[in-house]
Image (tube, helix red, strand yellow):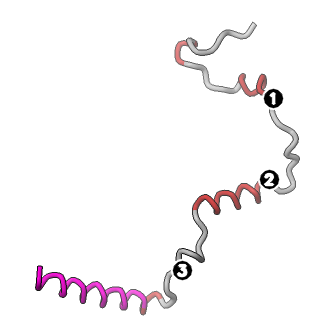
Amino acid sequence: PYVTFPVAFVVGLVGSQLEWFLRGDPPPTAQEEKSISEQREDRKLQEIVGEDVTKVVSLKDKLEFAPRAVLNRNRPEKS
């Protein structure tokens, strides 16, 4: 451990500097990049721009397109 750790540290430091030199720009910091949930929210907002959000499918119509339950035990039959 007394020999391995310093050698591993130096190799890691050299590798990090070499990678930074080859890529050019340092990677963005955590404060600059958006999280996955923020990216998802932005994409959803872009999708609904220009749509009429008051038009919604009724639950009765939505029930028709839902997958059928196994052996129809969980859903009563429509009359």
Q: Is 24 located above or below residue 29 in the figure?
A: below
Residue 12's spot in the image, x, y percent? Answer: 28, 84
Residue beneath disc 1? 58
Q: Is residue 7 covered in magenta?
A: yes
Residue at (76, 59) in percent of width and height? 46
Return the x and y of residue 68 as percentages of the image width and height. 60, 20
- Secondary structure of the residue carrying numbered label 2: helix
Picture residue at 30% right of the left edge, 90% below the top: 14
Q: Is residue 62 left or right of residue 71?
A: right
In the rendered image, the vertical position of residue 31 relative to residue 71, given as above or below: below
On-image quarter of the N terminus: bottom left
- In which quarter of the view is residue 37 placed? bottom right
Residue at numbered disc 2: 48
Q: Residues within 10 Å of mark 2 (few under 14, many from 20)?
A: few
Q: Which residues are magenta?
A: 1-20
Which residue is the site of mark 3?
28
| Element marked by disc 1 | loop
